Structure formats: structure tokens, C-alpha cells
Image (cartoon, rainbow, N blue to C red):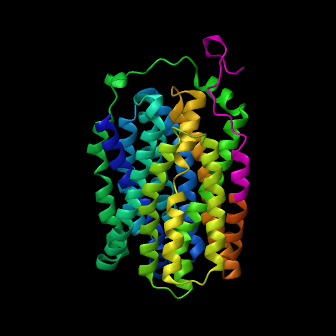
């Protein structure tokens, strides 16, 4: 288990760490290319949507054939996408590389696939904790990689920085070797008591699955809007780019503690209560940030608090899905939940660009983020976490 968690954690560190810094490229790219912020935001919105949609199919393949091949393919596409992002001459090609290629790459190298391996190989008693470790690794990647990405841009320029990150993404390939699963040796498949169709029918008829998906939509909206647009928001308010880099790094640092704590608490507390607290706390933190005088200190305080809440939704949400439905089709079901997250991400990053271009301000999107946090807190409270009871022979449906 140590090798599995170590390799999975480093893969998530690289994959998530690279993507968390994309907001640092918003102004360099748009200024160099003469594009609007909406153009850049739309490409990243496409990335998030493709990531979520492709994650469903990446999960299906990983459930049937193992995660190794999926991760290797994702690493190659990540490198190609970053290279294309650096040299795309038009908004369409930028959206195709930064959006489509990198979106598919992230589907194969992040949570849905990695958590599937964890779910199949870690006992239920330690599953939430193990997922917390993997999520914390993604947060550490943000803390580690965002300042590095800012430094690369400053030292080598935004294009060469993307090329160097593409080379870093290829390090995922040897790490994937540590996630090979004996049950999938030789390219074989594992027998399932349910077909894919039966598993999907069962999940989508279950109200708690729908509530978890709706809550995850809100998570995506909030974190991607903040992650992509906060650097420009702070610069618009007269703060230096270094403040934004440090702010994103602090989110990553404190998210290490927040996600790990959420994983540990998920072994002891109702996951719906953990999720409700996280969402309402986000709304409180955003409200306080907007009302307080904007200074570097207030930015760092907000970033630290948001860091504790950033990806801490990931372990309890995924552990709840595994607890309810089991692990046979977990990567696929996790992919559907994550697709909802990415629809929210699409809306958050895209609306941020659209409403800024129309109003010259991010104020409306901040208010939407606050309202959605309250909504998500309320809808997570009725979630039923008990394992679903199936009819004999795994026929879709539950008692």
C-alpha cells in the first residue's frame, strides 16, 4: 500500500500542481496575443468540461483494464497539450490544446483514476484516510508548483515555461508503474457482478448520488473561479503579481492539512456533515474577504482559510460514493460525480471572464459563489451514506 499511495500521490502532485498555476498565464497570454480575458477563460472552461466528460470514460477503462495504461496515455497528452498551449497562434487552437488535450490528460492522471486504484486496493476502514492522503498530495502540488511556475514565467517567459512543464508531465509515466494492479496483469479484465448499464441505472435512481453530484457542481464553480481569476482580481486592485502567487501557494499549503483532515474525519464522522460544513464555511470566508479592506495580509488570511476548505470536499465525496455503491464501478461513478464538478468549473471560469468583460468587475460572480455555497451545504445534509442493498445477481435497483 505504501508504494501505491506514494506513486499515486506524486502523480496527483504533478498533474494537479501544473493545472493550479494556469491562472498565472492569463495576463501574459492575453497581452502577448491581444486576446480578451474571456478567450483565455473559455479555453480553461473547455478544459474543465472535457476533463470531467473524459473522466467518465477514463474511469470505465480503468475499472475494466486497470489504471496503468490510462495514466501513461494521460501523461503523454498532458505534455502535448502544454506544448501546443505554448505555441497556439489562434484562440481556436489554444482552446484545442489548453482545453481539449489537457482536459483529456487530466482525466487520466487525477482523482477519478487514482481513487479507483485506492478504492480497489485499500480496505474500507482506511479508504477515506487514503483518499485524504492523495488529495493532500494534490494540494501540496499546488503549494510546490505554483511558485515554481511563477518563477519559470519570470525567468524564461510564458512560452518556454509551458514547454518545461510539458517535460515535467512526462515524469508521470515511470510513476504509473507503481500503480499496476495484479488483477489486471496481462491486459485481462476483472469480473463484475453488475454491468456498466446496471451500475449507472442504480446510481442515477438513487437520490443521494444526485445530491452529491449537485454539491460537487458548486465545489467546481467556486474553486476554479477563484484559482483562475483571483490573480487578475488582485492585480486589478493594485496588488503585485507576487501576492497572487503567494496566495495560490498558501491555498495549496493549507489544503494539504484540510484535505488530510477531511479524510481522517471521514472515518469517524458522517461525511454529509463534513461536506455541509465545508460549503457553508466557504461562503462565510468569501463574504468576509469581500467586506474586509483588501491588503496583502487579508489576501493571505483568506487564502489560508480557503486552503483548508479547497479540496477537502474530495475525500468525503468520493468515500461516500464508494461506501454507498462499492468499488467495482467506482472510477466510473466517481467520474460522473466529477463531471458535475467540472460543469461547475466551466461555469465558474467562463462566467468570470464573461461578466468581467461586460461589467469590468468580478463582483457578481463572487455573490453567485456565496449563494451556491449555502445551497450546497443544505443539499448535502439529507445524503444517505449506508451501503446500498441490491437484489440478487446485482440487478440494477435497490431496496
- Residue 358, position in %: x, y? 70, 78
> Which residue appears at 54% of the width and 71% of the height?
302
* Residue at the left extreme, as displayed: 174
Q: How many marks?
A: 0
- Residue 394 belongs to the span the image colors magenta: yes
> Which residue appears at 48% of the width and 44% of the height?
263
Say left or right for 69 vs 42.
left
- Chief secondary structure of the magenta span? loop
* Residue at the top extreme, as displayed: 392
- Residue 57, position in %: x, y? 52, 38
- Residue 16, position in %: x, y? 42, 55
> Which residue appears at 49% of the width and 65% of the height?
94
Q: Which residues are magenta?
A: 374-399
Q: Is residue 328 visible?
A: yes
The answer to which quarter of the image holds residue 84 is bottom left
- Residue 362, position in %: x, y? 65, 76
- Residue 386 belongs to the span the image colors magenta: yes
* Residue at the front extreme, as displayed: 268
Vertical position of residue 102 compared to residue 290: above or below:
above
Q: Is residue 91 visible?
A: no
Quadrant holding the N terminus: top left
Vertical position of residue 196 compared to residue 358: above or below:
above
Front residue of this view, candidates 164 and 254: 254
> Which residue appears at 51% of the width and 25% of the height?
328
Amino acid at each position: 500500500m505504501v508504494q501505491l499511495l506514494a506513486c499515486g500521490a506524486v502523480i496527483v502532485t504533478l498533474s494537479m500542481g501544473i493545472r493550479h498555476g494556469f491562472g498565472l498565464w492569463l495576463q501574459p497570454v492575453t497581452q502577448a496575443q491581444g486576446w480578451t480575458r474571456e478567450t483565455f477563460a473559455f479555453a480553461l472552461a473547455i478544459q474543465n468540461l472535457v476533463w470531467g466528460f473524459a473522466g467518465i470514460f477514463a474511469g470505465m477503462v480503468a475499472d475494466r483494464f486497470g489504471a496503468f495504461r490510462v495514466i501513461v496515455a494521460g501523461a503523454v497528452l498532458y505534455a502535448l497539450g502544454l506544448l501546443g498551449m505554448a505555441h497556439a497562434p489562434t484562440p481556436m487552437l489554444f482552446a484545442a490544446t489548453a482545453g481539449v488535450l489537457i482536459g483529456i490528460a487530466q482525466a487520466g492522471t487525477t482523482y477519478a483514476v487514482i481513487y479507483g486504484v485506492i478504492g480497489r486496493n485499500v480496505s474500507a476502514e482506511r479508504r477515506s484516510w487514503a483518499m485524504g492522503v492523495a488529495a493532500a498530495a494534490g494540494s501540496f502540488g499546488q503549494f510546490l508548483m505554483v511558485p515554481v511556475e511563477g518563477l519559470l514565467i519570470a525567468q524564461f517567459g510564458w512560452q518556454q515555461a509551458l514547454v518545461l512543464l510539458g517535460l515535467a508531465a512526462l515524469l508521470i509515466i515511470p510513476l504509473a508503474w507503481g500503480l499496476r494492479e495484479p488483477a489486471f496483469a496481462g491486459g485481462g479484465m476483472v469480473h463484475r457482478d453488475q454491468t456498466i448499464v446496471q451500475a449507472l441505472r442504480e446510481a442515477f435512481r438513487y437520490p443521494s448520488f444526485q445530491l452529491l453530484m449537485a454539491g460537487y457542481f458548486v465545489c467546481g464553480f467556486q474553486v476554479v473561479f477563484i484559482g483562475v481569476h483571483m490573480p487578475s482580481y488582485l492585480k486589478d486592485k493594485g496588488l503585485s503579481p507576487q501576492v497572487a502567487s503567494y496566495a495560490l501557494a498558501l491555498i495549496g499549503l493549507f489544503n494539504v492539512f484540510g484535505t488530510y483532515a477531511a479524510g481522517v474525519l471521514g472515518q469517524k464522522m458522517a461525511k454529509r456533515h463534513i461536506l455541509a460544513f465545508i460549503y457553508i464555511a466557504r461562503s462565510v470566508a468569501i463574504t468576509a474577504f469581500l467586506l474586509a479592506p483588501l491588503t496583502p495580509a487579508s489576501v493571505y488570511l483568506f487564502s489560508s482559510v480557503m486552503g483548508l476548505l479547497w479540496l477537502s470536499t474530495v475525500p468525503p465525496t468520493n468515500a461516500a460514493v464508494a461506501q454507498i455503491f462499492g468499488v467495482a464501478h467506482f472510477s466510473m461513478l466517481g467520474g460522473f460525480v466529477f463531471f458535475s464538478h467540472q460543469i461547475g468549473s466551466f461555469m465558474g471560469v467562463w462566467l468570470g471572464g464573461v461578466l468581467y468583460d461586460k461589467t469590468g468587475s468580478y463582483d457578481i460572480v463572487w455573490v453567485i459563489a456565496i449563494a451556491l455555497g449555502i445551497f450546497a451545504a443544505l443539499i448535502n445534509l439529507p445524503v444517505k451514506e449506508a451501503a446500498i442493498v441490491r437484489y440478487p445477481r446485482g440487478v440494477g435497483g435497490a431496496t
